[in-house]
Amino acid sequence: MAGWTATYERLCELDTVSPLEPAKLLELAMSAYLIGKEREGLNALIRAHQGFVQRRDLREAGGIAARIASILMSMGDAAQAAGWMARATRLLDESGDPGVERGYLLIPAARQSMMSGNVADAASKFDEAADIGERFGDADLINLARQGHGRTLIELGDVERGVALLDEVMVAVTAGEVSAIVTGIVYCSVLSACSDLFDIGRAREWTQALTRWCDSQPDMVPYRGECLVHRAEIISLQGVWPDALHEALMACERLGEPPGQPALGAALYQVAELHRLRGELDKAEAAYRRAAESGRSPFPGLALLRLAQGRCDDAAAAIGRVLQEARHRRVRSRVLSAAVEIMLACNDIAAAHHAADELDAVAQAIGTPFVRATAAHARGAVLLAEGDATAALSACRTAWTLWRELEIPYAAARTQVLIAQACRALHDRDSADIELDAACQTFQHLGATVDLARLRTPGVEPRSAAGLTVRELQVLRLVATGRTNRAIADELGLSEKTVARHISNIFNKLDVSSRAAATAFAFEHRLVESST
């Protein structure tokens, strides 16, 4: 079979000799779209539409108008898409033929409902389109509509039914039952759903399938780049960062031409994330900025970069602003996780606690292992900062187990650092050393230089000099001012018993036996300002 590029070039040459017939223009449009020439493909579709109108084949003309509406909607041209939907409706009404084109017209209408927030109406339209596809035996329409219906079910909270429907559609796709264009659309939609749900196992499986399909059509552009972005994300989670960076850079190259492809920003953001994790902070900064120029928000990664640069106030201000704006569940989950880390580093335990609470609620709603692990890690970090090492250890053990099952080594190592801190707070120094050694080995293998530096720098992680937690440091600072246990309890909103336990832990960690000695240690090691 000739490649899509050869087909496109052959049809273009024929078109210069003599204008192509509408049917051939449809073939030209498909080949143009599949090699990334979206505008050329759209122009060919419009010409085909006009040709069918001139022939008074209103049903065919109406069906093409519906397809044009879908493309324009994907390109962000909502007003033009609405105009083409209106034209498609009029032509199909005039044709008087209730054909399969009515179903294709429902697809952009359903997407329009989704974009306006009317998810239930979108679900109804997708369901109706699938019924029309069944009636006429149109596999493309059936599977387009079912993937849309699956996405709406997920948005409506019926995750189990929605995912089952997407899996059913993927069976049809991998069996070769649909066209190349629809295959790509469905693949990307399903992988996007997996990403929204943080369903790493399913995303990994379908990405491998997408890669095999893309490899069979090497000159096809629209899905090659997106495939590489998804591959980069998954390989990054698996801990093979050099390979992940290679895939992400290839995605940038593939998506750079023709310009304007929406997935380019996602590819650049992934490049930035990998540079940040590897400690290549200047390169990360440049990539985040390019991602923003390409239409992809550079957050929460840029806020975490500011934290890695030691600019804690800037990180906190940025993440706070982004958290106010983030609405989509996937985006908000990532922002919440970053907010916990940043707020703890900035000693704002109350804000971190609030973010961890919301992340817990998201984990309960979604239920996938990745989100549950993320929430458990955040909860453990907050509990540790609050001085409850026993509860923190339990939460962190849960997170570590889930990370191990998901085969995500970097996240597992970061959780091990928290486990080590909890063990040290509970005076189990042997276990703490074992956990820290294991985490260090993982960080060294990955090349996570920022995390290695944090382990060697007191006060950057949610613990302070001499292994003090953030809460213990707060108590020590108040002890240094001469406050009583009652006064400290009132200021921090704790019970006197909890304050007494913190002070006992402080004495043990500092190896002192009095408040005066603890105060002297605090001033000597600059844990409090001399003006205090």
Image: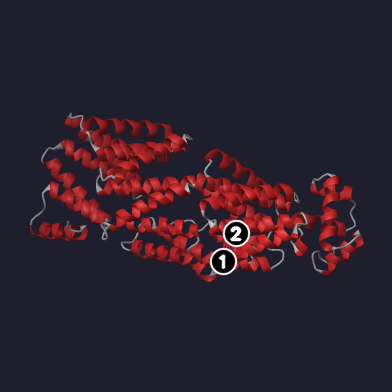
Q: Residue at x 10, y 40 (%)?
A: 55
Q: Label 1 sits on what residue type?
A: Ala
What element does badge 2 sit on? helix
What's under tag 2, amino acid-wise?
Answer: Ala
Q: Quadrant of residue 475?
A: bottom right
Question: Marks 2 and 1, Cα distance to the nearest angstrom?
Answer: 10 Å
Contact flag, marks 2 and 1 (Cβ < 8 Å): yes
Note whether residue 351 is visible. Answer: no
Q: Dot 1, how many residues are within 10 Å of its Cα: few (below 14), some (14-19), or many (20+)? A: many
Q: Indicate which disc, 2 or 1, sits on the residue closer to the N terminus.
A: 2
Residue sitting at 27 percent across and 60 percent down?
Answer: 218
Q: How many marks?
A: 2
Q: Is residue 49 left or right of residue 408?
A: left
Image position of 352 (left or right of 251): right
**Please, which residue is most extreme toward the left here?**
18
- Quick check: can you spot residue 456? yes
Q: Quadrant of the N terminus?
A: bottom left
Image position, residue 6 (x, y; %): 18, 60
Q: Is residue 338 left or right of residue 82?
A: right
Q: Secondary structure at mark 1?
A: loop
* Residue at image mark 2: 413
- Across and down, in percent, residue 334 comes to 54, 51
Q: Is residue 64 above or below residue 211?
A: above
State the image coordinates of residue 357 (x, y, percent, origin top left): 64, 43
> What is the quadrant of residue 290 in the picture?
bottom left
The residue at which mark 1 appears reads as 448
Pair 2/1: label in front: 2
